[in-house]
Image (cartoon, helix red, strand yellow):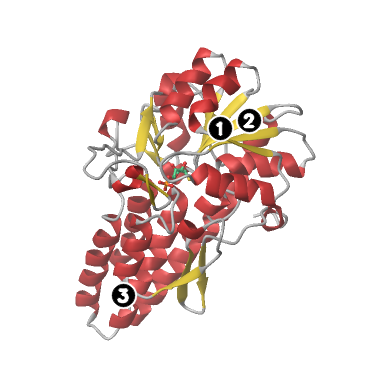
Amino acid sequence: MSNNSAAMQKVPLSVEWKDGELYLLDQTLLPHEQVMEKQESAEQVWQSIKVLKVRGAPAIGIAAAYGLCVAIKGHIDLPLSEFKELVKEKAAYLDSSRPTAVNLGWAMRRMLVLLEKDYEDSSDLYNQLVEEAKLIHEEDKAICRGIGDQGAPLIQDGMGVMTHCNAGALATSILGTATSLMYVAHNQDKKFKVFANETRPLFQGARLTSWELGKAGIDVTLVTDNMAAHMMATGQIDMVVVGTDRVVANGDVANKIGTLGVAILAKHYGIPFYVACPSSTIDMDTKHGSDIPIEERDGAEITTIMGQKVAEDGTATRSPAFDVTPNELVSGIITESEIIRAPYEEGLREFFKGK
Ligand code: MRU
């Protein structure tokens, strides 16, 4: 990671491993309170992921990798074979916390690969798992910076850039994915405006994206989700860039609910629509967007706004947390090493050749 990356972001780290303990920034309290919460058990980490204390595809993967270490730490007295079984069980448990972001399963599978090697004892394996989690975390920092370097040339002076949800520093190890382009372009003294969609129902755009970009001195304007069409129709948006929870083999992209609408609007108004992600978010085992599991969340999250009731008790609800944007609406997938463009099936296959 280039050494000025850390200086570009002005918000706390979302995940920290300090003196053998895991700390997660409680993002449900942002932007009003900044609380780093120590994670003491697998159940606590599972819950932190479920209720979005830690959120965003890469951050969930990193948190779960460390979370697995938290889950097994107290059991290093077990014989190695029993310990290995426990590691598998806890990894499956953590993986069950949220279904859509592929980074979670990716991180768990990567940790489990270590079980295939030989170890002196359970403590030796535990230490290796901690090292692997640290590696996943460190790699993500370089990857996010790489995404920023790849994507920043797309941002030109005078542009209006729209984003949806938070694919920011808070959703990753550092700098974010969609926001990494913005941090790098800002660091290059480019003058541009970001429009952050508020992102109902949980307001990641309002609470997180506008907060983190504003703190970094980036010109950011918050709009409600239903203002996106108007902003585009009145010529204020030149480019859209979002993050993703899963890109599949044909280039279809799952991201926060509402992204699909923004992509359709962008197509209508001839505005390029980019998706930024690390290669760990690309799932070549899933062929089509319709095969992506879409998390359905509790209706209480839409009948209330930040704890205030806005609909009658008993009101029927649906709350899919993500939607799938078909590949034909995507102008390019910005990764750490290149921007992949259509045709995506070939482009993605080529991208993974030799990796
Ligand atoms: O429900 P969330 O807040 O975890 O959803 C997050 C998103 O949709 C992000 O855009 C995605 O995970 C990419 S984060 C770099």
Q: Is residue 288 something that shows in the picture? A: no
Q: CA distance from mark 3 to mark 2?
A: 44 Å
Question: Closer to the N terminus: mark 1 or mark 3?
Answer: 3
| Mark 2 C-beta to ligand 1 under 8 Å | no
Residue located beneath label 3 in the image: 72
In percent of width and height, residue 210 lies at 60, 44
Distance between the alpha carbons at the discs numbered 1 and 3: 39 Å
Residue 241 tag number: 1
Residue that mark 2 sits on: 161
Q: Earlier in the sequence, mark 3 or mark 2?
A: 3
Residue 118 can be seen, yes or no: yes
2 vs 1, front mark? 2
Residue at image position (73%, 28%) is 156
Q: Which of the image's four quarters has the N terminus? A: bottom right
Question: What amino acid type should be assigned to the residue bearing mark 3?
Answer: Ile
| Residue at the outermost front position | 312
Quadrant in which residue 201 is drawn? top left
Secondary structure, mark 2, is strand
| Residue 260 drawn above or below residue 135 | above
CB within 8 Å, label 3 to label 2 = no
Query: Whole-percent x and y of residue 275?
Result: 51, 33
Query: At 67% across and 47% down in the image, what residue appears?
Result: 214
Task: Identify residue type, mark 1.
Answer: Val
Q: Nearer the viewer, mark 3 or mark 2?
A: 2
Number of the front mark, 1 or 3: 1
Category of crowding for the residue at label 1, using alpha-carbon neighbours closer than 10 angstroms: few (below 14), some (14–19), many (at least 20): many
Give the vertical position of 279 relative to 87 (above or below).
Answer: above
Amino acid type, label 2: Val
Instruction: Farthest residue to the right: give it.
Output: 189
